[in-house]
Amino acid sequence: MNALASSFATDPFDARFGCALPRTMRDQIAESTWHSMTWTAFTDRFSPTTGPLRLGSWTGTKSTGCKIEFDATFGIGDTIIACAATTYGPIEALTSMLHDAGFRIEILSFHQQIIGDETATFILAEHDGRREWSMGMAADADLSSIRAVLAGANILYR
């Protein structure tokens, strides 16, 4: 077995779904990490459900032209905030809302894969020179993307 096939076999995402993580993600995370990582440990690490930021609601309504009006509520600690943005897409809206709420992240890499009835989204995000990978999964591709960005923000702001 060659080294590339070996790294696919030790990738917990591949072990669970039969398709490998994005190559750049695999390349940046030490292969030794994959050997002992269970699916639970993988999701705890790359798709945390806890952190300083929680999504309450998310809606998007067509506006004039190509732009969409997005509204969201977030829980930040014990505080609930309402945010709005008019943009061309949900990721642009979300990162703008997060920036306004004090969660400044830059998305450096974005990957999506269809896994059965769900979409898996992987992002590499950066804040203050620290880079971290995160993952979101949902039946809807936009919601998968939103979950991945929120997971990234929670990882970077732990």
Image (cartoon, rainbow, N blue to C red):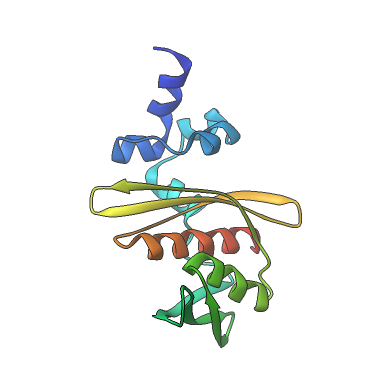
Q: Identify the image quadrant of the C terminus.
A: bottom right
Which residue is located at x 47 percent, y 56 percent?
47
Question: Looking at the rendering, which quadrant does residue 78 occupy?
Answer: bottom right
Q: Height in image: 50 above or below 63?
A: above
Question: Looking at the rendering, which quadrant does residue 145 occupy?
Answer: bottom left
Which residue is located at x 58 percent, y 79 percent?
76
78 with respect to 40 (left or right): right
Q: Whole-percent x and y of residue 74? A: 52, 80
| Between 121 and 37, the one nearer to me in the picture | 121
| Between 65 and 73, the one nearer to me in the picture | 65
Which residue is located at x 54 percent, y 72 percent?
93
Which residue is located at x 65 percent, y 64 percent?
157
| Between 148 and 62, the one nearer to me in the picture | 62
Residue occupying the far top of the picture:
1
Residue occupying the far right of the picture:
128
Q: Height in image: 70 above or below 153?
A: below
Q: Whole-percent x and y of residue 97? A: 59, 76
Q: Whole-percent x and y of residue 127? A: 70, 58
Q: Whole-percent x and y of residue 112? A: 41, 49
Q: Identify the image quadrant of the N terminus.
A: top left
Residue occupying the far left of the picture:
117
